[in-house]
Amino acid sequence: MTGLFKKFKNTGILVIGDLMVDQYVWGKVKRISPEAPVPVVEVTDENLLLGGAANVAHNILSLGGKVYVAGTVGSDDIGKIVVNKFRESGIGADGIVVDRDRPTTVKTRVIAHSQQVVRFDKEIKSDIGLATLSLVLDYVRACIPAIKGIIISDYSKGMITKALIAKVLRLCGPRVFVAVDPKVGHFEYYRGVSLITPNIAEASFGSGIDISDEKTLIAAGKILLKKINCGSLVITRGDEGMTLFERGGRITHIPTCAREVYDVSGAGDTVIAALTLAHSAGASLKEAAIIANHAAGVVVGKVGTAVVTPKEVLESMKICPDKPGKQNNQPQRTWRND
Ligand SMILES: Nc1ncnc2c1ncn2[C@@H]1O[C@H](COP(=O)(O)OP(=O)(O)OP(=O)(O)O)[C@@H](O)[C@H]1O
Ligand SMILES: [Mg+2]
């Protein structure tokens, strides 16, 4: 495992997706506004966290991989901050296009006395235009010699279109592993990719089967593999871990370790980052999925931050070697299911 992790630093991954910013405004409320029946928040602190595809990129960086990003920001101050944050942390940001037709996607939460007072979102979710698409594809073309994998992080904010995926697949050919974190409503875009990682709700929607037990899970997985014609499929199952479906019929359930959970948001970003990085560095899909399951397990146990280091993954593997999860105390099961 340590040998594999050492290879991460020479494993280039390009993340293409919807870049998002989570902005937090902290303050105190001492009075109600004279203008309307709303609290007046006296601001004491503010901070910005990168979310969506930007969080996927940070997860790869934290795992020790080499990461490049393609996406859009608006021609606004927050957009400049995003690009600078990337550059400062050593993430290739030349693929970030300043799109004058849309703002940087920002979700602002105002929090007073540990309680959210309001959230407001700035975003335009229409598909990117031809000029942006063409700039992104130029960047993808330029990156291909330096990368082993591409992650398409789709949050349905307009960056990921059917045309973009078709052209990316044509550009990279079979050498580059293309993994997609999908969004409901876009499943027909993903035909022919190497891997998709839906959660239970997304897999239920995409397959048309309501996943409620092992039988329906397996039926949905088989339908999705066939329908999307993808190389493999990982259905993430929250506290039950994940299930890997491979071509040829192998199905592997990977349960989670029992652990304290603080914040499950962003776990899906960690899964696709760790899985793609590990597989692109030489791990088999099953090994990569086991690593990703540990990585996501570490992340859900953290407050606020949503990234994980190789050291933390190794520690989790030591604590939980055969992943006897809370669901079972059974060893991990693998069987053929043709
Ligand atoms: N309660 C938990 N305990 C341990 N591991 C967890 C827990 N919840 C999630 N995970 C880990 O995170 C992975 C992804 O979680 P989930 O299936 O909820 O994805 P998601 O819905 O895409 O998440 P996101 O909130 O990022 O969109 C799981 O496969 C598992 O490895
Ligand atoms: Mg998700």
Image (spheres, rainbow, N blue to C red):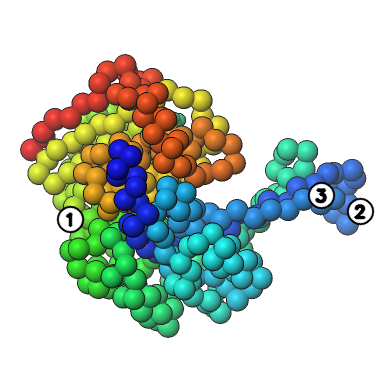
Question: Which residue in the protein does label 3 denote?
Answer: 44
Q: Quadrant of residue 186?
A: bottom left
Q: Earlier in the sequence, mark 1 or mark 2?
A: 2
> Image quadrant of ligand 1?
top left
Circle nearer the viewer, 1 or 2: 1
Nearer to us in this view, 312 or 228? 312
Instruction: Provide the secondary structure element on which disc 1 rests.
Output: loop
Question: Which residue in the protein does label 1 denote?
Answer: 229
Indicate whether 301 appears above or below 222. Answer: above
**Residue 222 shows in the view:** yes
Q: Position of residue 250 (x, y in %)?
A: 14, 38
Residue depicted at x 48% and y 38%: 299
Indicate whether 94 appears above or below 274. Answer: below
Nearer to us in this view, 253 or 276? 276
Q: Position of residue 228 (x, y in %)?
A: 21, 55
Amino acid of disc 2: Pro
Nearer to us in this view, 332 or 159? 332
Indicate whether 190 appears above or below 297. Answer: below
Indicate whether 253 appears above or below 121. Answer: above
Nearer to us in this view, 153 or 141? 141
Find the distance from the CA under tag 3 to the CA under tag 2. Answer: 21 Å
Q: Earlier in the sequence, mark 3 or mark 2?
A: 2
Residue depicted at x 53% and y 54%: 51
Circle nearer the viewer, 3 or 1: 3
Instruction: Provide the secondary structure element on which disc 2 rests.
Output: loop
Amino acid of disc 1: Asn
Q: Position of residue 325 (x, y in %)?
A: 36, 22
Question: Which residue in the protein does label 2 denote?
Answer: 34
Report the quarter where the C terminus lies.
top left
Q: Earlier in the sequence, mark 3 or mark 1?
A: 3
Q: Residues within 10 Å of mark 2 (few under 14, many from 20)?
A: few
The label on residue 136 is none
